[in-house]
Image (spheres, rainbow, N blue to C red):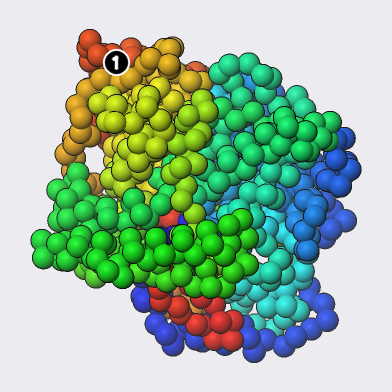
Amino acid sequence: MAIMVGTHSSLTALLRFSAAAAAAAAASLALLPTIASASGDFIDQDLRNLTVVKSPINPDITISYKEPKGACNLALDTQRQITGWVNVPGEKYPINLFFWFVEAREDTDLLSVWLNGGPGSSSMYGFFTGAGPCEVVEEGRRLTTKAREWGWDRASNMLFIDQPNQVGFSYDTATEGTGHMFMDGEYVTPPVSADSFPRFGNDWLAYNGTFSTNNDSSTANTTAAAAEAVYHLMQGFLAAFPKYNPPDEEPLGINLFAESYGGKYAPIFASKWAEMNEARDSGEISKSETVELDLRSVGIVNGCVDDIVQAPYYPIYLYKNPYGVELIGEETFTRANESFSSDGGCKDALEKCRQKVAELDPDHDGDSSEAAGYCVLADSVCSELANFYLDLDPPLSWYDISAEDPSPFPPVWYTEYVQTGGFNEAVGAATNFTQSSSAVWSGFASTGDFEMTAPIPMLAELVKSGIRVTLLYGDRDFICNWMGGEAVSLAIAEAAGEEYSGGKFADAGYADIQTNDSYVGGAVRQLGNLSFARVYQSGHALPSYQPETTFQLFARAVLGTAMDSGAEVDLSSFKTAGSGEADKQLELPGSPEPICWVRSAFETCTEEHLNALNEQTGVLINGVHYADESDWKGGSSTGEEEPSKTMTGGIYTGTATSEDGDSESGDGGDDNENSAVGLLAAKNVVIAVMVGVLGFVLG
């Protein structure tokens, strides 16, 4: 199933935005006069001030970095942070992958990698809205940052990576051009004169900048190709900064967490690392020229892993979810349920896709058009099981069934903040920020990457090899819903050998997630190295909705403790005890009022907002469109606050469940944590919308 994670254009938003307005926006950009050089917001490469070094173990890898002073206020002044790029060798095009490293608040050997999904979405989404160390807030008519209480740097050194090439701050060749505010990832080159365009506030519609080439042949077009590049990034980073490479000491090591399309990234990347470690051990590649990637845990956060397991749960979730909201009728449910296994249905199409890939593209290079055709068709057929969501009235967010579309959560102030000149200079950016790369999206779509791989055997192999695998799912998400996630966990168990198969994992039962001594954050099942959690009152972007619960689950996963409580246990014999079903029924909160972040216009703006932007009415303040200045509440947050004692660290430990008793957690209310509603980018629903001369396919 094709999904787009981040702030990318949604189909439902496009349906709200009139065709005339969309065409006018694109046409007006196309008609701007081309000039040799424009006095816009181009990145001055001389101001980057980077330290450039060659990898001490591989001189073909170059690392360029700096300490981004003022870009992200941390909980402690003693925490080091590094932004930089690893130049990856061996490809037909330049690869400069961006990373942002943050030291933990307390000294630790743990290193955890975070990846957002897409494909083609920046990990700055996770950095600034959920798992990262700081968040962007208003301070009057400017934006700043403050430390995030439940940032994952509370427990681990963190490495956020923008990948594949051309995503976020990663780039192939820095190219001057003009971008369109509504169309993230689409640019006109050479630049056009923004000064000759009717302006509205601060470059609201057309803005000059420095971008990647937006050429889909200059980036990865399969997850396997992306894994190769990220492996080289890890080699370069750990060679340049060896103090952050965890020692060979149980249970500490490197941890890989990925969200949404990360359900495919995580198993394929982890398998690549294991493959290269084996090549080092066998002498196939040099140990002196490589670094072992000592992976200890893999986490998938609301991941779309494999449609052959998860696709049937789209109609099931719509018909029978834990909030008692029947979104489709029994007749529609029955028809959809039967279609999955019918001739020419989703299962049939997937099996044919993977058979052709095995025959014609066994390395998943995306170089067989015949295999790709079968997999593109499979994605189209399987998407039909989710597309009932398009018929809902009113339309709901794909990422939170409690929220009408468009949804304002998580807040995306960062999309404006990262476009400022001061921020770009602080991090050493070579290009303006691209939240969602259309080049990456179209490349992955063209090869059928969405369906070509079967990740569950890879995850099972990780479990068998002693690597902890945890699946974390918010229960209000539709697009990668928790019911499908639970099915993935059971499928992994059946493929993970006799310790987990034959119903042993299912027999473990669900225990309460003890978030703190007064709040139960969800239900978790764990047997040894495999765990699955349903997190209550959370949409797709789990760390944003339930920050404390998600942090505690992350900390327990990377430390190898009991997932229900954080207690130290012997994982070789530990399993949770409780009900065989995570069947708690809850009530949905009300839908929030939308907020129109202009740099995420198609995700967050109503039809009224979009038309007002096109007509140049209203006001823009800190990147948000208001009909009138009186609608702005005024920015009062500050990045200068003294951190509270709870900001500096600390991991909750309760009492682990066992077969002899229940967890001793409290009975905290479901609304103890942030129960707002969520935003991520839209689902590909097999409808292509061409906008003006840009020819932009919005998925």
- Compared with residue 538, is residue 480 higher up or lower down, i.e. above or below? below
Which residue does the image show at 84% across and 58% down from the upper left?
A: 45
Q: Which residue is mark 1?
A: 657
Q: Position of residue 98 (x, y in %)?
A: 70, 49
Which residue does the image show at 84% across and 31% down from the upper left?
A: 288
Q: How many marks?
A: 1
Q: Position of residue 687 (x, y in %)?
A: 40, 76
Left or right position of 340 against 636: left
- Compared with residue 433, is residue 369 higher up or lower down, i.e. above or below? below
Which residue does the image show at 68% across and 55% down from the upper left?
A: 169
Amino acid type at mark 1: Thr
Q: Nearer the viewer, residue 552 or 422?
A: 552
Left or right position of 190 against 638: right
Question: Is residue 172 shown to the viewer in this render?
Answer: yes
Left or right position of 455 against 178: left
Which residue does the image show at 50% across and 41% down from the upper left?
A: 458
Q: Nearer the viewer, residue 398 or 500?
A: 500
Instruction: Provide the secondary structure element on which disc 1 rests.
Output: loop
Q: Position of residue 551 (x, y in %)?
A: 45, 30
Please tell me in which quadrant of the rendered image residue 659 appears: top left
